[in-house]
Amino acid sequence: MQCGRPDDFQVREVDEAGHVVDLDPAQSPALPMNAIPETAKKTSRAIEVTVPDCGWEAFLLQRLGDSACANVAAVAAGTIGSYALPSPDNLEDKVALSKAIQFVYPALQCDTVRASTNDAGDTTPASIALSLDPLYVKLEKGGLAVDDCKRIVTFLVHGPLAPSAEAGVRLQQELTKEARTKVHRLFASATACLVTKTNAAQGIDVYFSPKMLQRRKRKQQFYVQFVLQKVNVDHFSALEALARAAKTPTSSFTYAGTKDKRAVTTQRLVAQSVAPSVLLDAHAALAPMGLAVGHLAYVAAPLTLGQSGGNQFTIRLRNVEESPEVVAAAFASVASTGFINYFGLQRVGSPLQSVRTHHVGQALFQQDYAHAFSLLLTASEHDTPGLAAAKTTFTASRDVNAALRALPPSAVTERAVLMGLKRHGSDAYEKAVLNLPHHRRVMYLHAFQSLLFNLVASHRVATYGANVVAGDLVLDPATKNVRVVASADDATCCDLNNVVLPLFGSHTTVPTHAVGDYYKQVLDEHGISEDQAKQLKGAYRRVFCVPKDLHWTQDTEDATVTVSFQLPPGSFATMLLREVLKNMDFDATVGGTDDATD
């Protein structure tokens, strides 16, 4: 019995509202029909500055004193060229002081100067350097009225991202035709940031230049959600191909979870500040790779890992020789009691491989970068011939350039570490491994975390069975808080399906019964200290999982069983199948599939 073709294993993400994410690859994608949500347009945290009750001048006098205020006024009047004020330590206080100065003296420019230390060890504290704004000086010398000079500088300080930027500023000075020509020329020579136009009232309006407004659009943060379908493509390979096609870093894309390789998968992604037209162009380039995008829409925020309602699986099992009664009993059992919520082989690596993903993760936790590098460059029986040859070339000769030339284009991981070694030196293994994209390094660490969870989960179930006991950790579904079961009486009030174990990290704790000691034992057996294991924050994971909406049909003529069900985020379909088919040859049963996904 087995499911061997990608379309035998279909995974569709379920969003937080319970809707199954789908995509018809035959339907051409279209531009978003909705507008950009207002909440998506904020590019940074705005510090609100309100007018003080005493007024801006009195506020400055209170903050600076008579002497400093006199010097600030002297700079604004052009009596002295510059003046440095001590900078407040608090950011809000610094912003408030700078704003007050610019409200009272619009012609002044406030520049923050960081603290510094010279070779002699003398420290110069941080300051706010005051001087006349260069544009103000040019405009005033060019004959523009002082009030208009101040308004223009204020407009420029607010910048092209201000809500009123596109409205511009109307000069209050009355001008003849000859004077207007002179002002147009003055602005053209003074700054490339502003343009001037004669208005219907024969006055002059000042606007940001098209280049500045275009920069505003580029800086304006927005998010485009779309559906990605992939067929027989690894999650990270798909992400890297998408990033290349869109000419943007992989970090521009967020998602709720990774999906299988040997499957047809559908999921949501969110692209940050990537134009929808770019994604549409990428769709055509990605089609030959088994990738498709569609259902584009603007959204207010990126996705985070685990931000989904889980996954809907549709799996076809072939060569099923068991009777309908046996099949029905197996599925009915898992529908009612569930299964141990192990991480699947996709996360920890196939046992058929000599170098598994968790082996690399273990070396990274140990901070043994030379060993991690060696593992990544060790030829595996599952490598393509070209990749195996390139790895063998390097192992035999240590010739980085020869290995790089031999690597196939798809060998992203191997190319990254070899380029790191080439750049930093023949024994710079740490820098070579750190040349991997961050998400790749974290993937290896997660693999070892997952192996540790699987080992401890087996020990927990073998020791205490399907019962809640004192010392267990339980999750409160409402608050998401985790607490220790205090006593046997307390245990009777707890739901078995809320018992959790930690993915060991700096923000987690272990059960207070024997399983907590077993964590430390397994870490010790793998040569990892508790401090090393806390490189990640960690999380909690339920020990048991019960599927939703489990249905199956059996075709005895074709010897197939088609099963569909939903699992929560992070649970693996092959672990459900493992429970259903635990009395059969597991490798034969799921041959050709990776594990299910987050």
Image (cartoon, helix red, strand yellow):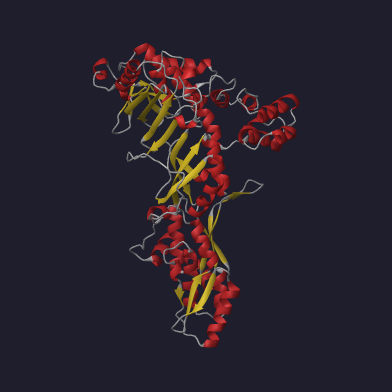
| Residue 490 appears in view | yes
The quarter of the image holding the N terminus is top left
Pick the residue in front: 145 or 419: 419
Residue 472: x and y, percent?
A: 34, 19
Pick the residue in front: 35 or 313: 313
Relative to 476, 361 lies left or right: right
Residue 526: x and y, percent?
A: 53, 17
Relative to 385, 192 lies left or right: left
Whether residue 419 is situated above or below residue 488 in the rendered picture:
below
Whether residue 565 is situated above or below residue 463 in the rendered picture:
below
Residue 362: x and y, percent?
A: 55, 23
| Residue 249 appears in view | no
Query: Which quadrant of the figure has residue 437?
Result: top right
Query: Which quadrant of the figure has residue 550?
Result: top left
Q: Residue placed at 50% from the left, 64% from the top?
A: 213
Residue 225: x and y, percent?
A: 43, 47
Q: Pick out the residue farthest to the top.
A: 463
Pick the residue in front: 469 or 341: 341
The quarter of the image holding the C terminus is top left
Pick the residue in front: 153 or 224: 224
